[in-house]
Amino acid sequence: MASPRHSHSSVGPQSRDSSSSRFSGGIKPGGGGGPRKMSSHDDRKGGRSKNDKAWKECATIEEEGLLEDEREEKGLPRRCYCLAFLLGFVILFSFFALILWGASRSQMPEITMKSIRLENFIIQAGTDASLVPTDMATLNSTVRFSFRNTGTFFGVHVSATPFVLSYDQLTLAGGDMNNFYQSRKSQRNVEVVVLGKKVPLYGGGPSLASSPGKPSSVATIPLSLSFMVKSRAYVLGKLVKPKFEIGVQCNVVMNPAKLNARVPLKNSCQYY
């Protein structure tokens, strides 16, 4: 009975030694079974690192592609916004200019005829430029009227057609007005000299005949005064520039016995 215990005790340390030697051999890097286990682990680790690197590269490429797509998608709306802004600005500016044009057209200048002064009127015998004998008429007069600019936010540049003073259809005198500028909400009095010197009558005015070198002896002579006043306003530079035209036609009754006196024209004119 003691012998088996002895043999059991002798076997136990050897078994422990062998088992410990096996475990220690598995832990040592230089053991027989160790390299095979480390190589498989390293292979898995190396494959995983390669896969991670490839995945990162793919993710980077995809992110760059997404960024480029986003840039392209963002670039198109910006151009559309610019075009829409430009088109909206043109529409608003045109609408604003149209409003200014309509508002300015309703503020037409006003003309009020005041008087005409006939200073001299003589009919005498003479010859025209081709030496044809005929009666010659000389007439000096001054026309006076007022011009008022009713515009509240613009001034006007004013000009006029020649002033014509005629008898029947025969022009006896003419004159030109000096151009001027009239500021907003203001007015001025304008005088224009209408002069006719040695105008040949050619028998067109037998009723105007008088003694040579003397004023006409006719009691009254009906004359006609006509002209047109033109004015232009530059409301928005040269983009909005309304134009106004006012025609004037006046009936003038001249009395050769009462020259150098003002003849009122307030109720003797028509405007068109």
Image (cartoon, helix red, strand yellow):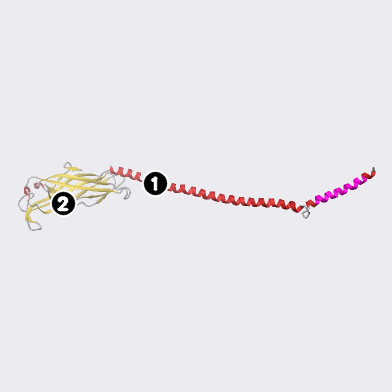
Q: Is residue 28 left or right of residue 252?
A: right
The disc labelled 2 sits on which kind of residue? Gly
Q: Earlier in the sequence, mark 1 or mark 2?
A: 1
Tell me the number on the disc at residue 174: 2
Residue drawn at the location 90% of the way across and 48% of the way down: 10
Residue 97 placement (x, y as % from top left): 33, 45
Asked whether residue 152 appears in the rendered view, the answer is no
> What's the magenta bit mostly, secondary-structure-wise?
helix
Q: Is residue 17 magenta?
A: yes
Residue 168 image point, x, y percent: 11, 47
Image coordinates of residue 266 in percent, x first then y, are 18, 42
Q: Is residue 23 left or right of residue 62?
A: right
Which quarter of the rendered picture does the N terminus lie within? top right
- Residue appearing at x 17%, y 47% in the figure: 226
Q: Name the one closer to the observer, 32 or 30.
A: 32
Residue extending furthest toward the top? 267
Three-letter amino acid code at disc 1? Leu
Q: Which residue is mark 1?
A: 87
Q: Report the magenta residues as a range.
A: 5-24
Q: Is residue 187 magenta?
A: no
**CA gap, disc 1 and disc 2:** 53 Å
Query: Residue 40 at what x, y percent from top left?
Result: 72, 51
Viewer-proximal residue among 229 and 64:
64
- Circle 2 — which element? strand
Q: Nearer the viewer, mark 1 or mark 2?
A: 1
